[in-house]
């Protein structure tokens, strides 16, 4: 059975489009395009005052909701940053301290290794069984 699009069916389609706009499922531009297509199919080339008013009200509610969301999100993000900032600073300071301690340990180990190698070289050269070709420390 083929259904024809009548006035009541067109009205329902328009209301569906406006409901999708209000729910944020489509943009205002998409809604205007869809409503325009319906109007062309219905032989209308304009939006009724009631529809225009409804779209305007829907857009105003959407804008207000978006503004409230943005404000609330901003406040929560700032609070989260304030909560996390001291923890990040403390963790950074600990990482810096541990890195400095590790660098100090490496430097100390290198210094000890160099001193040990130098003392072994000196001890070797003082022994009687050194070859004449062995360089003597200065």
Image: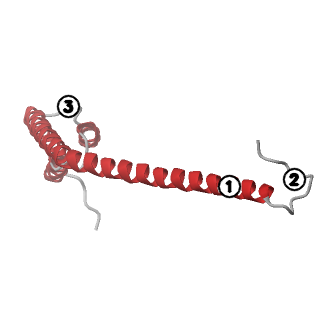
In front here: 20 or 43?
20
In front here: 83 or 133?
133
Left or right of 117, for residue 51 = left
- Residue 46 got which mark? 3
Quarter of the image that includes the C terminus:
top right
Q: Is 59 located above or below residue 93 in the figure?
A: above
Local crowd at mark 1 within 10 Å, few (<14), some, or many (≥20)?
few
Left or right of 96, for residue 58 = left
For the point 55% across and 56% down, the residue is: 109
Residue for badge 1: 119
**Residue depth check, mark 2 versus mark 3: number of the one nearer the observer:** 2
Residue 69's x, y, as percent? Answer: 14, 43
Label 2, label 1: how far apart the Cα atoms are: 15 Å
- Residue 134 got which mark? 2
Q: Of callouts 3 and 1, which one flags the residue occurring earlier in the amino acid sequence?
A: 3
Label 2, label 3: how far apart the Cα atoms are: 105 Å
For the point 38% across and 54% down, the residue is: 98
**Secondary element at image label 2:** loop
Label 3, label 1: how far apart the Cα atoms are: 99 Å
**Secondary element at image label 3:** loop
In front here: 89 or 129?
129
């Amino acid at each position: 059975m083929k259904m024809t699009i009548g006035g009541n069916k067109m009205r329902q389609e328009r209301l569906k489009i406006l409901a999708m706009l209000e729910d944020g499922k489509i943009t205002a531009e998409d809604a205007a395009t869809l409503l325009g297509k319906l109007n062309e199919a219905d032989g209308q080339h304009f939006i009724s005052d009631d529809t225009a008013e409804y779209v305007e009200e829907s857009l105003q509610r959407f804008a207000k909701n978006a503004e409230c969301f943005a404000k609330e999100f901003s406040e929560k993000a700032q609070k989260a940053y304030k909560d996390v900032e001291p923890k990040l600073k403390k963790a950074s300071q600990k990482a810096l301290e541990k890195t400095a301690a590790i660098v100090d340990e490496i430097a100390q180990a290198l210094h000890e290794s160099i001193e040990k190698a130098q003392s072994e070289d000196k001890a070797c050269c003082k022994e009687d069984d050194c070859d004449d070709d062995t360089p003597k420390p200065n």
